[in-house]
Amino acid sequence: MATVDKMPMLAEGYEKLQKEVRHLKTVERPSIIDAIEEARGHGDLSENAEYHAAKERQGQVEAQIADIEDRLSRAMVIDPTTLSGDKAVFGATVHLLDENDKPVTYQIVGQTEADARVGRISYNSPLGRALIGRNVGDEVEVSTPSGDKYYSIEKIEFI
């Protein structure tokens, strides 16, 4: 018997996935069907590049829809404002000092919501895994492709 792993995500990430699957179903799917019908009108399907391209795109879109619907069905939506405590957990915003005493701030989020450029890291990322369960004052060492990084946890917020 297979187990279904819950996938933690913020409400914002859940809504983004819902919007994406709605777009695929209401915009992409109908346009692909129209392209297939038009390509069928061009005659012999065995040598019809437009038909084969449209069918391939249809397969890609259906796979995307299935993947997103799977993630939505396993979603465990977490609201960080309802959390508290002194440990870094999913949804927490963690204020760090790097080895050069430069302040950096990251929110620990789900895989689909991660974007380090805006301060959101996945709980599965090397830094996310290193931070989970840590307290204010703890020092964290993270191995990254660009070398080992060291951080000190200065503050943990649930915003």
Image (cartoon, rainbow, N blue to C red):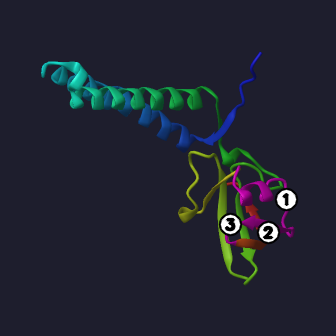
Mark 3: few, some, or many residues within 10 Å (few <14, many ≥20)?
Answer: few
Looking at the rendered structure, the number of numbered marks drawn on it comes to 3
Residue that numbered label 1 is attached to: 134
Give how far apart the Cα atoms at labels 3 and 1 are: 22 Å
Disc 2 secondary structure class = strand
Q: Residue furthest top?
A: 1
Residue 90 placement (x, y as % from top left):
72, 48
- 41 or 107, which is in the foreground? 41
**In the displayed structure image, the side of residue 134 where residue 33 appears, left or right:** left
**In the displayed structure image, the side of residue 142 where residue 125 appears, left or right:** left
Which region shows up in magenta?
Answer: 124-146
Check disc 3 and give the amino acid type.
Pro
Please say if 33 is above or below 125. Answer: above
Residue that numbered label 2 is attached to: 153
Give how far apart the Cα atoms at labels 1 and 2 are: 8 Å
Give how far apart the Cα atoms at labels 3 and 2 are: 22 Å
Residue that numbered label 3 is attached to: 145
- 96 or 148, which is in the foreground? 148
Disc 3 secondary structure class = loop
Residue 91 numbered tag: none
Disc 1 secondary structure class = loop
Kindly indicate whether the residue at mark 2 contacts the one at mark 1 (C-beta within 8 angstroms). yes
